[in-house]
Image (cartoon, rainbow, N blue to C red):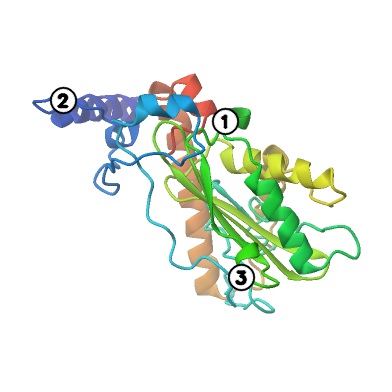
Amino acid sequence: MRSTFSFLLLFIGSCSSLAPETPRVVSRRHLLGGGALFTPMAARAFENALPEAAKFTDRPKRKGPQPPDLGLAVRSVNQYGDESDGPVLKICKGAPNCFSTSGDEEFDAASLIVPWKPPSGVTPAAAAKQLEEVVAAYQPGQEGIDGGGFKIITAPSVKPDGTYLYAQFEALKNGYIDDLEFAATKPGEVQVRSSSRVGFLDMGVNAKRLNYISAKLRAKGWDAPVIDKKAMRIISSKIMAQPNFFQNASPIAAQETTARVRKLKARSRWMRSTVILIVSVDDAIGGEFRI
């Protein structure tokens, strides 16, 4: 109770210290102490944004920097330093704001998804073309997300037999940018990744986006499973609770990984006890608040 009270005093103090002489919009991230890390950017939404995006053009945008290591590469896929068998998309970092087909089946269980599969006989280039068509027809605002629109940055169609797609999606009010990638690297399999740049929680935005796209692909005969975030969290918790979870790890790796898990759990407990003080229902549903 005392710690919560101290947080409230800090929260009130932050509000007063941020108050400028000329009124301006102050984001919830500033009130949580994240303003120093994310400089406000005045920027317009993508061209296909919802009409109401015009109401929030004067609000500071928290787009976040584009990750420098997107795309395909041979990567370390687990805490043991094992490398991927060939180029893969980036793995998730452990925060519940990302899904990827790359990673470790045990440690990354909450974010690891299976590759999507096009119908039999569809070449990688043809699969990438279908993906581009579906993403290009994406509806900003579906499920209350991505109201700031989206843009395909790297399209498979710009290259002969292109198989990689990269797109950016923007939140309606605060301008958070999420990165979406697809890579049809071999017949019958497509790598997938959708991740938030800013914050720890995404309020389900990445799952909603991938589920919308996968539903359109399933209508074309694809095997692209629905993401059930609750079920994935349960699976992850059971795996990490196993007594032999770290049995094959070196002492240093096991110690570092255990500390990381404890840190994530402590942060989750803090968020559950404080976020209710600040988050409005509409912002939470639309992914407009991210810690």
Residue indicated by mark 2: 16
| Drawn side of residue 117 relative to residue 179, left or right | right
Residue indicated by mark 1: 141
Q: Residue at x 84, y 52 (%)?
A: 223
> Visible in this render: residue 171?
yes
Percent from the top left, x then y, of residue 179? 52, 53
Residue indicated by mark 3: 77
Q: Residue at x 59, y 75 (%)?
A: 80
At label 2, which amino acid type do we have?
Ser
Percent from the top left, x then y, of residue 34? 30, 42
Percent from the top left, x then y, of residue 183? 67, 65
- The quadrant of the image that shows the N terminus is top left
**Towards the viewer: 121 or 233:** 121
Q: Please tell me whether mark 1 or mark 2 is closer to you in this view.
A: 1
> Visible in this render: residue 238?
no
Q: Secondary structure at mark 3?
A: loop
* First of labels 1, 2 by sequence position: 2
